[in-house]
Every structure is written in C-alpha cells, then in structure tokens.
Image (tube, rainbow, N blue to C red):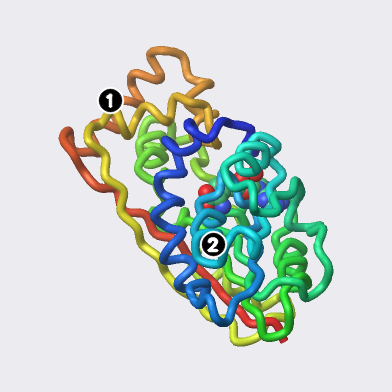
Amino acid sequence: MGFETDDTSYDLYMGRYSRVLAPPFLEFAGGNSRNELRLALDVGCGPGAVTNVLARRLGPDAVSAIDPSESFVASLRIALPGVDVRAGVAEELPFVEGRFDLCVAQLVVHFMADPVAGLAEMTRVTRSGGTVAACVWDHAEGGAPTSRFWRAVTALDPGCAGEPRRAGTWRGHLVQLFESTRLTRVEAGTLTVRVRYSSFDEWWEPYLLGIGRAGEYVSRLNQSGRNALREKCREELPAGPFDISATAWAARGVVA
Ligand SMILES: C[S@@+](CC[C@H](N)C(=O)[O-])C[C@H]1O[C@@H](n2cnc3c(N)ncnc32)[C@H](O)[C@@H]1O
C-alpha cells in the first residue's frame, strides 16, 4: 500500500492519531530518559509524529528517521533540518550494527513486506542493551481508528474482507514477532488514545482523500455507493462533537 500523500491529507486521516499515540508509545519504549539515550532511530517515520517528539527530547542531532515514501522524507527533511532523514525500508537499514540506543517503529510493522526481516534489522542497528519497540493498531478486535468505517462497509458489502489480517494486528502477534528475533526481555503493552471530532463530516471527509485501504475502497465506489456508506457510517456515530478511541498493540525488547 502506498503512502505517497501530502502531510496535510495524512494528518487529517491518520496523523491526528499518530501524534497523540507518539508520547505514550515512547514512554512505553523508554524513550523519555535523556540520560540513557544518545541516539534514536524512527523506522517508517512518515511525516514525523515520533521523530518530532524524539528530536524535542534528545535534540535533532541525536535522531535518525527513515521511510520509503519520498514525499514524507522530503517534507520531514524541511520540517526537521537537524535530523538525519533517509529514504529506505526497515528490511534494509542503511546503518552500521549497534549504532542506536533506541529503535522504534510506530504503526509500521504491518506494512513491512517482511516484518521478521524488518525487526531483525531494527535489532541489528541497536546496541547491546538498547531497546527496540513497535506498535500496530488493533485491527482484529475492532480497536483501530478505521474499525467503525470497516464495520459499516461490511454491513453493506458482506463480500468485502475489510481491513486485511496484517502482521502484528491481532492480540499477541507483535510480541510473537519480537520473540522471533534475538531480542530479550520482550514485553507486551496496550496503548489507547482518544481523538476528538467536532462533527460527523470532520470524521467522514478524510475517507474521501484516497489514503490507505479505506480511502482506496471509497474511491472505487460510485456516488450512490458512497452516499449509502456515508449514511451507514453516520448511523454508527453521534452527530455532535465526539471522541474516537483507538488501541494499539505494543511490544518492546532489549538487544542481547
Ligand atoms: C501508518 S504510517 C505511520 C507513519 C508514522 N510512523 C506515524 O506514526 O505517523 C506507515 C508508514 O510506514 C512506511 N512504510 C511502509 N513500508 C515500510 C517498510 N518496509 N519499512 C519502513 N517503513 C515502511 C510508510 O511509508 C508510512 O510512512
């Protein structure tokens, strides 16, 4: 799935969740302690929700970030000029062994072509005693930001499989992936965040931007299909200001 979109569209769709998820995720990863951390890597950085927090806490010179999306890489280089932002994938990290104290991937493992290879690379570039951490939305138990959307889709279109069963998105699987690497002291976490919408339209309109699998689904519908889906979603949500809560499975481990 491609992530060649502009930061504003991404922010309306998913960035608003990843920005509020980044601080608790870094707390879970142990990324708050300036004393113990010198260098950190944000894998699959996107427009920089996690990179921004790391750069504020550790200083931009201490932070590297990498993503295959050229548009995200270009905009993050402008937004955070002191950060070393690279184009590339988790499965082939262009860094020497043991370089980082902390290596994190927020909402990325399920998009990796080979999650085991990606986590092995994150482990390789982290020093012995350093931490590798990741989190992925709970798609399997309906805790993802897009879960209400997919419930409405499958009610109208029972043949649609909805959000695919990607790596790490069901309970316990992210930890299992971590345990397949040479990480030790692997621990699981559950992170829940809330995002406020002032109206139903503010929630619905990002689905018209064509981003991600949900956006692709909407863009394939004709106008009456879109209207029907919009009405179904509206039935599921309150009219006025409301909060959507979203839950991510998290895992962390220490490099042997
Ligand atoms: C949902 S976004 C998350 C971005 C950011 N971490 C955040 O929390 O907002 C997923 C990101 O993973 C990136 N990505 C996809 N495949 C990847 C891979 N194999 N290695 C590293 N990043 C990847 C995408 O380009 C995209 O920026």
**In terms of sequence position, does the residue under pointer 2 or pointer 1 come before the other?**
2
Q: Are marks 2 and 1 in contact (CB under 8 Å)?
A: no
Circle 1 residues within 10 Å: few <14, some 14–19, many ≥20? few
* Disc 1: which residue: 231
Among the 4 quarters of the image, the one containing residue 231 = top left
Q: CA distance from mark 2 to mark 1?
A: 41 Å
Quadrant of the snapshot with the N terminus:
top right
Q: Position of residue 133 (x, y in %)?
A: 58, 70
113 vs 215: above or below: below
Whether residue 116 can be seen here: yes
Q: Which label sits in the foreground, 2 or 1?
A: 2
For image coordinates 60% across by 87% down, the residue present is 185
Secondary structure of the residue carrying tag 2 is helix
Give the residue at mark 2.
54
Q: Residue 60, position in %: x, y?
A: 60, 58
233 relative to 108, above or below:
above
15, above or below 138, in the image: above
Task: Identify the residue shown where x is 53% and y is 80%.
Answer: 187
How many numbered tags mark residues here?
A: 2
Q: Amino acid at mark 2?
A: Leu
**Disc number placed over residue 13 in the picture, else none:** none
| Quarter of the rendering containing residue 118 | bottom right
Given residues 39 and 117, the one toward you in this image is 39
Q: Position of residue 106 (x, y in %)?
A: 55, 58
Left or right: residue 20 compared with residue 94: left
Secondary element under disc 1, as helix, strand or loop, is helix
- Relative side of 95 to 79, left or right: right
Residue 168: x and y, percent? 57, 62
